[in-house]
Image (spheres, rainbow, N blue to C red):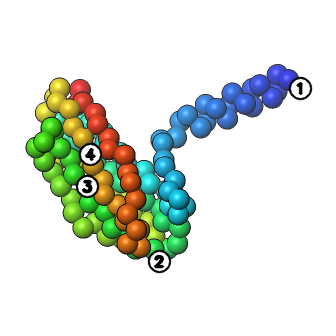
Amino acid sequence: MRKIIAVVSAFVIVLAMSFPAKAATKSGAIVSPGLSFSGTTATCSLEVYAPYATDSITASITLKRGNTVVKQWTNLTDSGIMDFSDTANVSHWQTYTMHVTLSINGISYTVSDITKTCP
């Protein structure tokens, strides 16, 4: 019986680690920003799941290298669910930061910046 519990527990831990991190806000919204690289192309993504389908979502995303803005997407809007993804040209061995501003129904939410180096 103990072996079965140990195997099931290990399976649950492995399964939980295989999903990307998502942050839940106080309102119950789920926010998942992402920054990835493929060669010299960066992909910035943002998934937002608001508590209700009628909730108004507004976001802006800025990709920067140091203090230089590489690309910016402003006034992105949706209702209920936002599923955004777009690319920008980047350089190898440079460090980039993706900054997100987000509001749901006019209430601002803090989204942690993502900083990564292009391999």
Q: Position of residue 106 (x, y in %)?
A: 37, 72
Question: Could you tell me how far apart the alpha carbons at marks 2 and 4 are, in whole angstroms?
Answer: 27 Å
Task: Say which residue label 2 marks.
Answer: 54
In the picture, which quadrant includes the C terminus?
Answer: top left
> Is residue 53 rendered to the left or right of residue 108?
right
Q: Residue at x 21, y 59 (%)?
A: 73
> Is residue 3 rendered to the left or right of residue 31?
right
Q: Nearer the viewer, mark 3 or mark 1?
A: 3
Task: Say which residue label 3 marks.
Answer: 61
Question: Within 10 Å of the Cα at label 1, are there few (<14), some (14-19), or many (20+) other Cα atoms?
Answer: few
Question: Could you tell me how far apart the alpha carbons at marks 3 and 1 are, in whole angstroms?
Answer: 50 Å
Q: Residue at x 53, y 63 (%)?
A: 27
Camera-side residue of 34 and 114: 114
Camera-side residue of 85 and 95: 95
Q: Check if mark 2's residue and mark 1's residue have beta carbons within 8 Å.
A: no
Residue 37 lies in quadrant: top left
Question: Within 10 Å of the Cα at label 2, are there few (<14), some (14-19), or many (20+) other Cα atoms?
Answer: few
Q: Check if mark 4's residue and mark 3's residue have beta carbons within 8 Å.
A: yes
The disc labelled 2 sits on which kind of residue?
Answer: Thr
Q: Position of residue 48 (x, y in %)?
A: 43, 59
Q: Which mark is residue 98?
A: 4
Task: Say which residue label 1 marks.
Answer: 1
Q: Check if mark 1's residue and mark 4's residue have beta carbons within 8 Å.
A: no
- Name the N-terminal-most of marks 1 and 4: 1
Question: Could you tell me how far apart the alpha carbons at marks 4 and 3 are, in whole angstroms?
Answer: 7 Å
Question: Could you tell me how far apart the alpha carbons at marks 3 and 2 are, in whole angstroms?
Answer: 22 Å
Q: Nearer the viewer, mark 2 or mark 1?
A: 2
